[in-house]
Image (tube, helix red, strand yellow):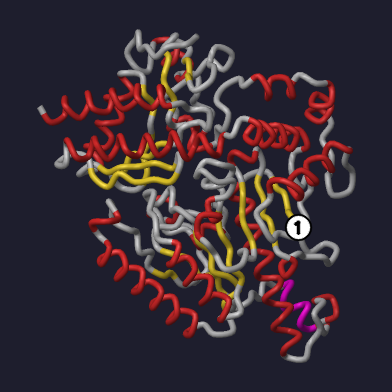
């Protein structure tokens, strides 16, 4: 049974030696932890120096069942998994029965309500790009038909086909919100507005941005202010949709803005966004790459938004083990060649995804996220009450948890002090601590983390 301990400076000597070998990896500049993936277990991450951390980071919410979960180990040990791992296929053309098991499990048990099809790629950002592409396809087909032209672009006049092949783009747009993060691909990046460093020096489509209302917490103390911000945001959205009438392919939004600072808005706000989007004849896309797969306390976070009808598309990634999007029938692309990805998702990852979902259902991990996450949020609110000059805006849904410190430097110092005590959290936004516990996290783990947070806050305010 692992227990939290830090026995070296961080990073330790073995970790530093490993990182020193990292000069050829362009992303090596980010690396600070080198972990022992055989020794790590459950919610405890063990590094190569033998330090043991209570992991509230889960690799930016990639982790679902903790480290070396026996169900996943058992699946990965089967001959079927080995064969799927070593025999890559162009899945749309050549696949195995295990792929159909995955698709049927998603359709019958785990996909969001109202979805007609799913499209798989390798990761969440690619999934967002693919959903945006589907939105543009449907929008373009509708525009051509409305103008008396063909739905099928292959039936366009030769001159128009040549113009398209010479990079004549559409004037259609995607509407996104300030603070949004939808990915780093050149499509999704144009809908991303969280940090300058993501966008600097990159070409971008001239797509409009609407202010996100970002509720202030505790909600009961900011009722009027939050309502006013949401009303202003909806008014701005209506104006943008009017200004681009007939040209809006989709409105994309996260149920909780994660990379942008763990920013929330009310169900009524999302209902308003969906209503305005539908009136504009555009697709309503919910980006659930980080918020999906039980972490919010429901399978999909938008289940808590009381939407009058399902969204047109829902993107996924991270805990799903692969990326992609679900679509209603209106955005199911059926023409051969229009939506295609060589692998269309990794078959081995799909097997792990099914096992992850089955374990979540069997072990009631959505309920665990609600109950233990609620306990964690109550503890964070108590932390804020005791240290109001240091800790503010404690907020969350399930295990989507965050709180703020006064400055970026203060936030980073808080995280560093916690890590030195064996609790691994992470950052988001400008000055927020982001917590993404594994779905198997218990109340005892939470109480252990809160004890460290209180100790660190006391130390920082002494």
Residue sitting at 73 percent across and 84 percent down? 144
Give how far across and how far down residue 159 sits, in percent.
79, 83
- Residue at point 14%, 41% (across, down): 389
Of 405 and 91, the residue lying toward us: 405
Q: Estimate the x, y position of residue 433 in percent, counting from the top left.
A: 33, 39
- Residue occupying the point 63% across, 44% down: 123
The magenta span reads 159-165
| Relative to 280, 143 lies left or right | right
The percent coordinates of residue 37 (x first, y second) are: 57, 17
Q: State whether the magenta stretch is mostly helix, strand or loop.
A: helix
- Residue in the foreground of this view, choosing between 222 and 12: 222
- Does the segment drawn in magenta span residue 67? no
Tell me: residue 168, above or below residue 109. Answer: below
| Name of the residue lying farthest toward the bottom | 148
Q: Is residue 161 magenta?
A: yes
CA neighbours of label 1 inside 10 A, class few (<14), some (14 to 19), many (20+): some
Depth order, front residue of 153/407 = 407
Q: Residue at x 72, y 90 (%)?
A: 147
The image quadrant of residue 448 is top left
Q: Residue furthest left?
A: 462
Figure label count = 1
Q: Quadrant of residue 153?
A: bottom right
The C terminus lies in quadrant: top left
The local secondary structure at tag 1 comes to: strand
Q: Please tell me whether residue 120 is drawn above or below residue 140 in the rendered image.
A: above
In screen coordinates, is 393 left or right of 371? left
Q: Is residue 90 above or below residue 139?
A: above
The residue where tag 1 is placed is 117
Is residue 168 left or right of 370 when viewed as pictured? right
């Amino acid at each position: 049974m692992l227990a939290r301990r830090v026995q070296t400076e961080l990073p330790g000597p073995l970790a530093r030696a490993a990182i020193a070998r990292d000069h050829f990896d362009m992303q090596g500049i980010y690396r600070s932890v080198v972990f022992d993936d055989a020794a790590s277990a459950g919610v405890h991450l063990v590094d190569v120096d033998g330090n043991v951390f209570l992991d509230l980071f889960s690799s930016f919410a990639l982790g679902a069942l903790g480290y070396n979960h026996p169900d996943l180990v058992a699946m990965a040990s089967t001959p079927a998994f080995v064969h799927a791992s070593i025999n890559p296929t162009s899945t749309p053309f050549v696949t195995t029965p295990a792929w159909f098991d995955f698709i049927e499990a998603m359709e019958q048990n785990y996909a969001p309500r109202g979805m007609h099809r799913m499209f798989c790629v390798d990761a969440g950002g690619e999934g967002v790009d693919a959903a945006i592409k589907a939105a543009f396809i449907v929008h373009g087909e509708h525009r051509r038909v409305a103008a008396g032209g063909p739905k099928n672009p292959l039936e366009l006049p030769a001159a128009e086909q040549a113009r398209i092949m010479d990079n004549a783009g559409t004037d259609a747009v995607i509407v996104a919100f300030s603070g949004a993060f939808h990915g780093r691909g050149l499509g999704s990046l144009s809908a991303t507005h969280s940090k300058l460093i993501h966008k600097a020096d990159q070409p971008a489509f001239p797509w409009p941005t609407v202010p996100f209302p970002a509720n202030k917490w505790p909600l009961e103390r900011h009722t009027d202010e939050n309502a006013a911000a949401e009303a202003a945001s909806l008014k701005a959205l209506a104006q943008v949709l009017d200004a681009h009438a007939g040209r809006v392919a989709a409105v994309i939004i996260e149920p909780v803005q994660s990379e942008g600072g763990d920013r929330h808005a009310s169900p009524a706000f999302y209902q308003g966004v969906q209503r305005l989007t539908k009136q504009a004849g555009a697709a309503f896309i919910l980006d659930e790459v980080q918020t999906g797969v039980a972490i919010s306390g429901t399978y999909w976070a938008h289940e808590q938004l009381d939407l009058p009808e399902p969204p047109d598309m829902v993107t996924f990634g991270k805990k799903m083990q692969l990326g992609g999007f679900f679509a209603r029938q209106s955005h199911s692309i059926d023409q051969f060649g229009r939506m295609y990805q060589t692998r269309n998702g990794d078959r081995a990852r799909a097997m792990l995804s099914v096992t992850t979902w089955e374990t979540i259902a069997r072990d009631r991990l959505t309920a665990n996220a609600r109950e233990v996450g609620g306990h964690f949020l109550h503890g964070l609110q108590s932390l804020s009450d005791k240290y109001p000059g240091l800790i503010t805006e404690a907020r969350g849904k399930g295990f989507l948890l965050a709180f703020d410190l006064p400055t970026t430097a203060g936030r980073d110092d808080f995280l560093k002090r916690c890590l030195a005590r064996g609790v691994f959290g992470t950052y988001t936004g400008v000055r927020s601590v982001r917590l993404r516990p594994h779905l198997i996290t218990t109340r005892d783990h939470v109480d252990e983390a809160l004890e460290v947070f209180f100790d660190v806050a006391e130390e920082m305010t002494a």
